[in-house]
Structures are given as C-alpha cells and as structure tokens.
Amino acid sequence: MNQKIWIRIPKNINLTNNHEVMKLILNKQNGKQRVLYCFDQFILYGKVGDIANKYLKLDFDTKFEIIYLQNNRNGDKDCLNQIIGIQFLLDFGNKMINSKLEGGEILIKELRDFLRLRINQYKFHQYFRVLKKIGKGNFATVYFAERIEDGQQFAVKAFSKQVAYSENNGKESILNEIQIMRDLNNQHLMKLYEVYETENSLYMVLELLSGGSLFDLMRDKRSLQLQEVQKILAGLLLGLQEMHQQGIMHRDLKLENILFKQKNQLQSVVIADFGLATYVNKNQYLFYRCGTPGYVAPEVINMKDTKQKYSQICDIFSLGLIFYILLSGKPAFLAKTYKRMVRQNRQAIIDFSIKQLKNLPDDAMDLLKKMLEKDPKLRIDVSTCLNHSFINDIAKKIQETEINEDSDNDLGEIDEDIDVGLRINQINQQYFVFEASRQLNSPNSSSDDSPGIIMKETGKKQKEIDSTILLSGQSPLFKGRIDTIGSVHSLDIQSPQLNHQQSSAIKQSKFALNRQKGNQTILKYITNN
C-alpha cells in the first residue's frame, strides 16, 4: 500500500464547526503551488484556485521539521541558517514518510508558530544548546537549555521513549500531559512552549521558573504574613480557574508542585506538574485514586467504583489543605505512620481548633472551612473562592497587574551573581525528581538522538556538564509512581513552622523505592481500580 501524508478529506469532517486559523501558499519541490488551510486539529491542502481535496490530521503521529539552507563552509552546530521550507512527517511505526514544502522564512515561521502549539517538532539537537543537567529521574532527565535561534532559556524534560512507552499506560500518560499543557495558557500555570521528538526521545520545552517552590518557602521561612498567604492563594485560585473552566482537574496539588517565577515575588506563583491532571468529562480516567496522601480530596482517595466520577472540586479540597499549612504551619493530617496518614486523609476530619488558627480573621477561617468541606456537593467552587471577602481584593489587584505586564519579560533572565546550575538545581530538585514503585533500566542506546549523546556533544564546548546521562525507571506520569517529595517529606520539614517531631517511620517512608516493601509504603498513590 502506498502511504501518503496528504489523504482524501474524510466525509465526517464538519468544516462549519471548525474555525480556520490561518491560510498560506507554499511550493512543492517541483515548483507547483499549494494552499494550506490550517484548522485547530487538521490542515486542508489543495491547488491554488481549486477547492481543497487533501487532508492531514494534527495528532501525536504527525510531526514537522523546519528546513534550513545548507551551509558547507563550516560544521558549526551552534548556528542556524536561513529557513527555506518545512516538511511534514507521519509516523507509521515501522517507517516515517514525509512531504516537503518550500516558502519564505517569515511565512514558514508563522506556520511553525501555529504547529508548535499542536504537534511535535522532529529533531532537537540542532535547535538547542544544553547548558546543564538540573534534575534526573527514572524516565526523565531535565536540562537547563538555551534555544540557539533566539537565546531564550528553558527547562527541557527529556524522556526515553522506549522505556516510557513500555510501561502500562506510559504513552497515553505522556500524551495526556502534553495535550493538557497545550490547552492551558495562564500566568499561574506552568507553560509548555513546544515538544520535540527524535527516534528514541521526547523533549518537553518548559517555562524556566527561577523563584523556588512553596516547599522551599515553607522550609526556609519562619512564618508568613496574612497578606503573603492571600497573594499565594489568590494566584493559585486564578490558575485553577483557568483549568476548571476548561474542564480539567489537577489532582496532585501540594507544596512541591507550586513554584514561583521570581524569588520573593509571591504573586508570581505557578502550578506545575500536570502528570495526574485529566479532563473531567473523559469516559474513563487513566488513573482514578491518585495523588499524594495528605493532600487528596476524600472523594478521590475513597473511590471504589471506577464507573463513578468526581469533578474539579477535588482540587479545592487539596488547595484547602495547602491553605491550612500556610495559615498554621502544620499539615492538617499529622500522623506518625504512613497508614495512619492515609486513614486520616480518607476520613477527612480536620481540626480547626488548633492554637495556630485561633487568632485568624473570621473571613480567613470561613474560606478555609468552606474549601475543606468533606462533601464535594457542599464544597465551595473556584469562582466563589475568588469572590470571597478574604481573597477578592488581592485577586483583582493581581489580575490588573498582569493585564499591564508582558508575561514573557522575565523569561530567561539570569542573576549573574549566582551560579546558574546550582541555583536552578536547588529550585527544581523536588519537582524534577522522578521515581516509581518499580525500577526499569534504560536500554543502553548508542543512537545519536539520546540525551546522553546530547550532553556528551555539548560537553566538548562547556565545562561542568554531565556527559554520562542515561534515562531509566519511571516518571511521575505513570501508574504506581512514587514521589520522594510527597506529603510525608513535607511533614518532615526542619523549620520552626513545621516543628512537630516526626517518627522515624515517616522519615523512612520517603525511601520506599529503595526498600521495596510493597504498595502500602509508597508515597505516590495511584491505582487504576
């Protein structure tokens, strides 16, 4: 069978319900012109002056690659020449087919900007300069990288496809996370800029956040002023509002998954790690009971029948538990063992009478109790939270400030007085540690597109770069994942705020991966049924 990129337009395509995003004319290699009509989920293709009769679906199997003018004068891989065209590629598993089109640089860049929000770009190495490894886990390694074309700096999360896809629901989990992040666009949600793919690896180009995590803040800071709590909570609610309006629930809100764009800029708070996020209206979730004990809504952790559903309101309970920590400096579920913590989380019985909460304003306590309502039908939703008297004025001020700011001004700015690698590693060490309940070893690949080879090649030009990276094990996207910086670790913070003495059992449970004592010891808690 002769497989082609452009196929006949399916009869079930309803153009009246789809909005044309852009239209452009490019040339085939033989010089003949073709018109591309670009829609959100597909591209129509035809001769100039005729009705389009060909079609290309924009999905995970479709990729694109920018074609540059060849330069034979030198082999400088840190230099990109003039853009002269684009090729679409379709992955049939056993082979890759392509279709090349030529056009002016400005036109191709416009098409690239449209495509990078929807499908993966093929190849990676010639587009980025890898500066440092900033995190390593089982399926993924994270690099601090610079885009060669414009010097922008990013965090790049690299996956070993062979290892990741071999895990149960592995590929589906990655696709789910990528799609969700592509659908979201809010200053309080970690941004995914683009995704690159090679034969063996997948690269997520992420926003570089340089302000540390909420975990860091709670560990290092003696106490938070009430206004500081309001700024953090308002920003998180604004991010959740964007998610919930699109029918998406995060399902793993916790201190470690809350980051800041800038140090000491609490209003720049950002929700990260969408590995467990899902669309509410999906017929079947990849994972049902999931999250980190100590932060999970009761309707999620107590779910027994996979035919049942829960909604975005589960995130409000998780955020309420974070709100509780911000106000009191103590977790709501403070147990001496992992099992007891899970039991407390299931029961969702919360003590609002502790001394740390006694002197708080009435509106703060009112919002806290409404967010931590055990019955999801009675729990306050995100819009009502934002309109609550405790948070409303602060939320409006943050929104007004964001309207007047260019959200991209901070991207890539580096404080030259601080070692970049050390700082970013400190900032992201929790977020980018990926572990799981059973370890898998990476294939000892020698392919030119493996992350290890990237590091080796870049290391020829740069000092202090780890050139022996291999990806192995599991990422937090997958079933049975363990997060060593989960709630038990959060309870074991050595600071005046969280100074309750923990038992050795809790401290040891964060090493559950090494101990391998069974599923009841894991911190990250995911089941399919």
Image (cartoon, rainbow, N blue to C red):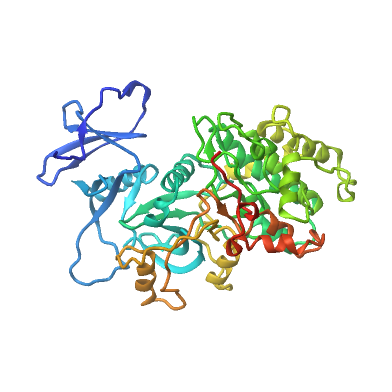
Quarter of the image with the N terminus is top left
In the displayed structure, 125 sits above or below 19; it is below
The image position of residue 349, as x and y in percent, is 80, 40
The image position of residue 93, as x and y in percent, is 27, 47
The image position of residue 245, as x and y in percent, is 57, 32
Between 155 and 329, the one nearer to me in the picture: 329
The image position of residue 154, as x and y in percent, is 47, 59
411 on left or right of 427? left
In the displayed structure, 27 sits above or below 261; it is above
Quarter of the image with the C terminus is top right
Q: Residue at x 47, y 62 (%)?
A: 141
In the displayed structure, 65 sits above or below 151; it is above
Q: Residue at x 27, y 52 (%)?
A: 66
Tell how many labels.
0
Quarter holding residue 365: top right
Q: Residue at x 63, y 46 (%)?
A: 253
Q: Can residue 12 be spotted in the picture?
A: yes
Q: Residue at x 69, y 31 (%)?
A: 376
In the displayed structure, 196 sits above or below 8; it is below
* Residue positioned most to the left: 30
Q: Can residue 211 be spotted in the picture?
A: no
Between 465 and 389, the one nearer to me in the picture: 465
51 on left or right of 296? left
